[in-house]
Image (cartoon, grey):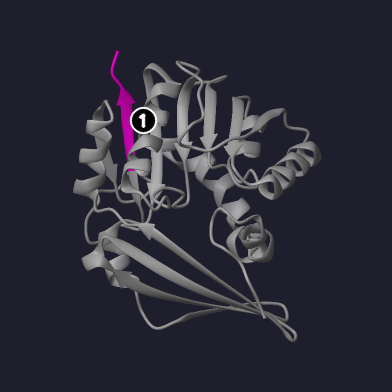
Amino acid sequence: MTRTGGFQDDDFWTEFHDFLFSEQRHQQAEELLDTSPLLSFPPGSRVLDLCCGPGVFTVPLARRGHEVTGVDLSPAMLDRARKRSADAGARVALVRADARRYEAPDGFDVVLNMFTSFGYFEDPDDNVRVLRTMHSCLVPGGVLVLDLAGKELLARKVVPPKVVRRGDDLMVQTDTVLDDWARLRSDWVLVRGERVTRATLVWFVYSAVELRRMAEEAGFARVEVFGGFDGRPYDENAERLVLRAVRAT
């Protein structure tokens, strides 16, 4: 049995990559960029994909003519993004950096943070720092799109363990609510033949009201919350919590 150390451990991203970033997820990103009003940006926009992973959105955005920078802390994920961009003939800039400390003042028209990549730092102030990084990287009038699983949605979905099979591999995910719904812990078990890998992720979960307040305190204006990339309301029919906000001029 092996154990990985969570989201800052490259072994975690390597071991669980196929479950986290399936080809279906890459295809979903392509479809969202083709259809979502929240992901429709002016041609040639400068886009920061913060916590870009293996380039799920980075590469298709670049193929659509945007000037894209992907930032991630994981060398393994950046290597995969680099290969995917080369295979697609897409020109992207890839930077290894901590999301709390990345600096590109007034460097982007759009900042994206996708697929629940927010809230993983142990100190809640560090998660606020990530929002401030997003704010400082935008030009005045620039747009933030932040996508995550909202606390209201998770409350409906924290159920008995989820089992996913890919070929001969089996992954079991068990979620546990912590600190009166301030955080969630996910315990992952991956079985590959006789090899068993375990990992644990703990992250802060946010309601729409909490995330809106944090964005406003970080300096964002015109903060809107949607229940999906189609722009639906954040109500009982919501599928995601998608926050869109603007850096005030």
Q: Position of residue 147 (x, y in %)?
A: 40, 46
Q: Is residue 116 visible?
A: yes
Which secondary structure type mostly characterizes the magenta part of the structure?
strand
Above or below 231: residue 163: below
Side of 248 where 127 appears, left or right: right
Q: Is residue 237 visible?
A: no
Side of 118 where 128 appears, left or right: left
Residue located at (41% from left, 30% from top): 134
SS type, badge 1 = helix
- Within 10 Å of disc 1 (Cα), the crowding (few <14, some 14-19, many 20+) is many
Residue located at (28% from left, 18% from top): 248
Asked if residue 26 is among those painted magenta in the image, a careful observer would answer no
Residue located at (57% from left, 19% from top): 44
Q: Which residues are magenta?
A: 243-249
Q: Hey, which quadrant is residue 219 in on the image?
A: top left
Asked if residue 245 is among those painted magenta in the image, a careful observer would answer yes
What count of labels does the image hold?
1
Above or below 86: residue 114: below
Q: Position of residue 154 (x, y in %)?
A: 32, 65
Farthest residue in the bottom direction? 194
Amino acid type, callout 1 = Arg
Above or below 127: residue 237: below
Residue located at (76% from left, 39% from top): 88
Q: Which residue is mark 1?
A: 132
Above or below 46: residue 77: below
Q: Position of residue 78 (x, y in %)?
A: 68, 43
Which quadrant would the C terminus be assigned to in this image?
A: top left
Q: Hey, which quadrant is residue 94 in on the image?
A: top right
Which quadrant would the N terminus be assigned to in this image?
A: bottom right
Side of 41 where 228 appears, left or right: left
Q: Position of residue 238 (x, y in %)?
A: 30, 57
